[in-house]
Image (cartoon, rainbow, N blue to C red):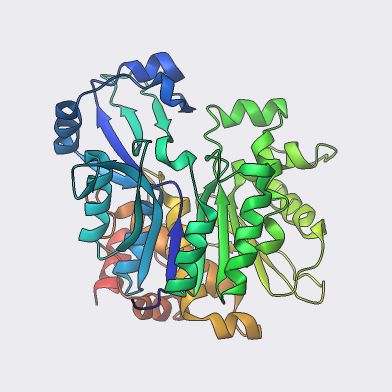
Amino acid sequence: MAALDVLILNTAVLDLRSREFQFVQRLVGPGGLARCSIEELPRFCEADYARWIAHGATAGGPGNVAPLLARAGLNVGVGAFLGAGPYDGFDLVGYTFRERLKQANVDVAALLPHPSLPSAVTYIYEAPGQERGGIAYFANANEDFDFGRFLDVVRARRPAVVHYMYSGLSRRGDAREGRDLAEFMAGCHGHGAKTMADSHTLTPDPSRQIAARTPVPQYRWLCPVWPTLDAFFTSVDEARMMLNTLWPDHSVDLSNVESSAVEFLDRWVQGGTVDRRVLVGVTAARCAWARWVLPNGAVGPVACVRSRFVTGEIVDLVGAGDAFRAGVLAVMARCGAEWDAGSLDLEEVVQMGHLMAALYIHGPLEDRCRYIPSFEVMRELVRSGAKFTSWAALRRAVET
């Protein structure tokens, strides 16, 4: 098999939307968001799933990132467990997830059937009227991530970059408080890959959690992982929750976005030296703050990079953070030598993230990749220095 530019691992999930999912409100509350146990999953029949899939199902997790990279011309693969069943070896949900990715030209050879757990599902309640609908995530087969088996995939497929999605959401993936993931990422380095990981705790009410300075234990599991990464980007809300969890002595005004981001980046670099160049950053709706960490222990200044591509009213930012990381992953995969040599401009890397996110959020729900051009076109657009004040102008620039 051909070598991969990017291998994306973990959290393969099919997102289903329906007005029938009233049970979600009982589990997570109106407008709530939570990870639920398999014991709480109602006993739906296959005909139910077939109907909901026909109504509209999207591939979440890696499905937010891999198709974007494939559309940009990268050779990208996805690895995770899906439920076993009669649909070419998978259950109906897992088969649908796999087919969505295949249709997007994503390599699915590392999607493997799990012998006992069903495929992961996110149920999104489409509430009527002004009622706020909740979101319930059932990890199912994602609970059992097999590091040894997927390191074999890394060894065989030789990816330039390995991206592990959503630490904090898998029992086996988060085993030994993140140390297993850290050892895995170090093993990926041993096979020549750069690494990125992110986190997601499905905190139901981040604003309340941040204001109360309530710790989120899952963030502590990132501490052993961070030294094994080449890039780490998180949202400003997650950065605030990490500050409250990992550095509760901080005195930063958490209502100030920039202060929160800079404080997180200052605290992050105190974790010790690494043997390579690392890019760490915090993203917000129209801006990102980032800095290089250098192999000699030195750190670069924090750069505030405002998007030149987010235009007009932002209607829906769901998935924008994943799309931003897709832009960074593309640079890591295609410009690895420049990354290592220190010749990559930080603003260029971050603007690639901004551009990918802007194109993603303007794509229709059924085709979020519609406006993604080749990597070469995106890089040329970033390097042009052009700034866009309307979606129409950005779309014309991409399409020409």
Residue 299 vs 34, above or below: the answer is below
Residue 268 vs 92, above or below: the answer is below
Which residue is painted at 48% across and 39% down in the image? 143
Number of on-image labels: 0
Dividing the image into 4 quarters, which one contains the N terminus? bottom left
- Is residue 308 visible from the viewing direction of this image? no
Which residue is painted at 76% across and 50% down in the image? 263
From the viewer's perspective, is 89 left or right of 208?
left
From the viewer's perspective, is 281 left or right of 140?
right
Which residue is painted at 27% across and 63% down in the image? 371
Q: Which residue is situated farthest in the front direction here?
A: 115
Dividing the image into 4 quarters, which one contains the C terminus? bottom left
143 or 337, which lies in front? Answer: 143
Residue 47, given in percent of the width and then of the height, sits at: 14, 28
- Is residue 210 visible from the viewing direction of this image? yes
204 or 316, which lies in front? Answer: 204
Residue 284, given in percent of the width and then of the height, sits at: 55, 50
Residue 3, given in percent of the width and then of the height, sits at: 40, 77
Q: Which residue is situated farthest in the right direction here?
A: 249
Q: Which residue is situated farthest in the top direction here?
A: 26
387 or 161, which lies in front? Answer: 161
Residue 224 vs 144, above or below: the answer is below
Which residue is painted at 29% across and 42% down in the image? 84
Q: In which quarter of the image is residue 390?
A: bottom left
Residue 177, given in percent of the width and then of the height, sits at: 68, 42
